[in-house]
C-alpha cells in the first residue's frame, strides 16, 4: 500500500506533463512539500494582461512570473490551475412541515367557506387537500431555492479565492516592473 501511495503522485505528474497542462512544475517546501503546475500562458490562466515596462528579457519574464505565481499561492493557498473545491455552510434552512401547515390552513379556510354553504365537513376536507398540495409545492420551491442559494454561495467563494490570487500575483509582478491590466 505504501508503494502504491508513492507511485500514484508520480503517475499523476507524468500524465499531466504528457498532456501538456503546464509549462513547468515547482516544489514548494513549507511544513510539507507541495507541487503546483505552472501555466503555459499566465495571461490566459489569470485573465490578466502583463507587459514588461523595464525591457525585461524572456528568461527574466518567465522567472518573474514563476516567482510571483508561487508567492501568490503562498499568500492565498489557492492555485487557479488546480482550484480547491469550495464547500460552504448552508445559507438557508429548508422549512419543515409546510404540507401539514398548508393542510391546517386549507381545512380552516374550507370549513369557513363550507359553513356558509351549509357543508362544513366537505369544505374542510377540500380545503385540507388543497392546503397539502400548496404546502408541498411551497416545500419543493423552498428546497430548490435552498440548493440555488448554496450553489451561489460556493460560486461567490470560489470567485473570491480567484480574485485574491490575482491581486497577490498582480502586486508581486507590479513590484518587479510590469504593467498589469
Image (cartoon, grey):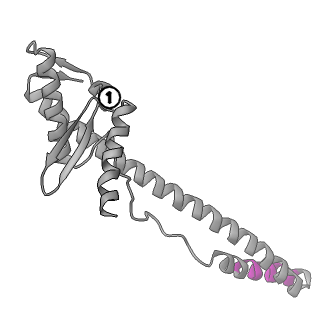
Q: Residue at x 49, y 69 (%)?
A: 93
Residue 171 in sight: no
Which residues are drawn in magenta? 105-116
Q: Is residue 92 above or below residue 117?
A: above
Which image quadrant is residue 180 in? Answer: top left
Tell me if 172 is positioned left or right of 135 in this view.
Answer: left
Dominant secondary structure (helix, strand or loop) of the stretch shown in magenta:
helix
**Image vertical order of residue 133 relative to residue 69, above or below:** below
Tell which of 27 and 62 is nearer to you: 27
Q: Secondary structure at mark 1?
A: loop
Q: Residue at x 62, y 61 (%)?
A: 141
Q: Quadrant of residue 111?
A: bottom right
Q: Quadrant of the N terminus?
A: bottom left
Is 76 left or right of 123, judged from the image as shown? left
Question: Does residue 181 appear in the picture of this structure?
Answer: yes
Q: Position of residue 167 (x, y in %)?
A: 21, 37
Q: Is residue 96 magenta?
A: no
Q: Position of residue 34 (x, y in %)?
A: 21, 49
Relative depth, front residue between 7 and 110: 7
Which residue position holds label 1?
47
Amino acid at each position: 500500500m505504501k508503494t502504491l501511495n508513492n507511485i500514484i503522485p508520480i503517475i499523476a505528474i507524468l500524465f499531466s506533463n504528457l498532456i501538456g497542462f503546464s509549462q513547468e512544475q515547482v516544489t514548494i517546501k513549507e511544513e510539507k512539500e507541495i507541487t503546483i503546475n505552472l501555466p503555459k500562458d499566465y495571461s490566459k490562466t489569470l485573465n490578466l494582461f502583463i507587459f514588461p515596462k523595464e525591457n525585461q528579457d524572456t528568461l527574466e519574464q518567465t522567472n518573474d512570473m514563476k516567482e510571483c505565481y508561487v508567492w501568490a499561492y503562498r499568500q492565498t493557498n489557492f492555485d487557479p490551475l488546480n482550484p480547491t473545491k469550495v464547500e460552504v455552510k448552508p445559507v438557508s434552512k429548508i422549512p419543515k412541515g409546510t404540507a401539514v401547515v398548508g393542510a391546517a390552513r386549507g381545512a380552516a379556510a374550507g370549513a369557513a367557506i363550507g359553513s356558509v354553504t351549509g357543508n362544513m365537513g366537505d369544505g374542510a376536507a377540500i380545503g385540507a387537500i388543497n392546503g397539502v398540495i400548496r404546502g408541498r409545492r411551497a416545500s419543493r420551491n423552498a428546497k430548490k431555492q435552498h440548493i440555488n442559494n448554496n450553489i451561489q454561495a460556493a460560486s461567490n467563494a470560489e470567485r473570491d479565492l480567484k480574485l485574491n490570487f490575482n491581486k497577490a500575483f498582480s502586486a508581486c509582478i507590479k513590484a518587479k516592473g510590469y504593467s498589469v491590466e
